[in-house]
Image (cartoon, helix red, strand yellow):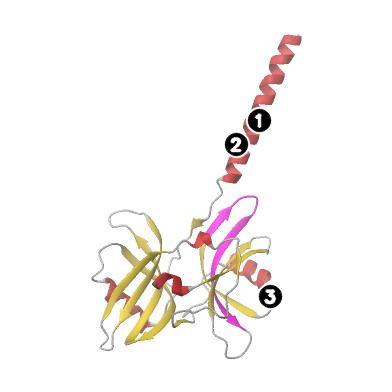
Amino acid sequence: MKKIFGVLLVLTLAVFVTACGSKEKKNESNEFKEVFPSEMVEKDERIIKVFEDAKKEYTGLELELIATLGEQVVAGTNYMFLAKGTVPGSDKASYKIVVVYNDLEGNSAITKVEDFDYTKYTGKNVDYDAEEKVGGWEVAAPGKPIMLEEEVQSIFDKATETLTGMQYKPIVVLGTQEGDTTSYAVLCYAQPTVPDSREYIYILTIKDTNEITGMAYVDLAEYNK
């Protein structure tokens, strides 16, 4: 009887340890997963044409416009876009920052395509530096600022309702993280409440418990060095 009890005890402990290990492994493996919008955010037909004309000569990736992030006045205009990039002939997609130069005659060309790893901003608190040089980039107000499902919009509104100093307008949910709670990485247009202040791009990390766990400033100049 003691031998049988001992065997049962060992088996029980083994199952318990395995279960705990699996749970711990599951928690450790929780990562943000991309959520691509079903439609583009940008609604300005002129800007859409600039992007579409530019991508005609680009063969590296299949690019789908999501939103305009910023503009830079040069001898013509540089535009910075958020896009979905897909490897031709596959379903492998990721977020890309695409810079397009539109010359004074209206000709457009892609000058840079950079990976946009939004996860490096999630769960972090990074504020803008008032003295930071932004390379002449001005944040573009979103053509369609609301791209959230009703439930997520409600979570966003409740989480941000007590914030002061800056108004955050969601552009798109970039990804979600599933665990005991669900977290959302939301790309936002941030507008200071102080008059005549310039706008910014932020990524807010928000839980479905209406808690903000990260507010990170995205410096557009980083993607056009």
User: Which residue appears at 56% of the width and 49% of the height?
Assistant: 30
Give the mark nearer the N terminus: 1 vs 2.
1
Q: Secondary structure at mark 1?
A: helix
Quick one: label 3, few (<14), some, or many (20+) residues within 10 Å?
few
Residue 102 appears left or right of 170: left
**In the figure, residue 29 lies in which quadrant?**
top right
Residue 160 appears left or right of 176: right
Residue 157: percent from left, percent from top = 64, 72
Residue 177: percent from left, percent from top = 56, 55
Please name the amino acid that badge 1 sits on.
Val
Please name the amino acid that badge 2 sits on.
Ser
The residue singled out by tag 3 in the image is: 163
Give the main secondary structure of the magenta stretch. Answer: strand
The residue singled out by tag 1 in the image is: 17
The residue singled out by tag 2 in the image is: 22
Residue 129: percent from left, percent from top = 57, 76
Total labels: the figure holds: 3
Q: Secondary structure at mark 2?
A: helix
Please name the amino acid that badge 3 sits on.
Leu
User: Which residue appears at 60% of the width and 58% of the height?
Assistant: 183
User: Which residue appears at 62% of the width and 79% of the height?
Assistant: 167
Query: Which part of the image, by quadrant, shows the N terminus?
Result: top right
Residue 80 appears left or right of 190: left
**In the figure, residue 199 lies in which quadrant?**
bottom right
Depth check, front residue: 74 or 95: 74
Residue 124: percent from left, percent from top = 60, 63
Depth check, front residue: 4 or 152: 4
> Which segment did they paint magenta?
175-192
- Measure the alpha-carbon separation of dots 2 and 3: 38 Å
- Measure the alpha-carbon separation of dots 1 and 2: 9 Å
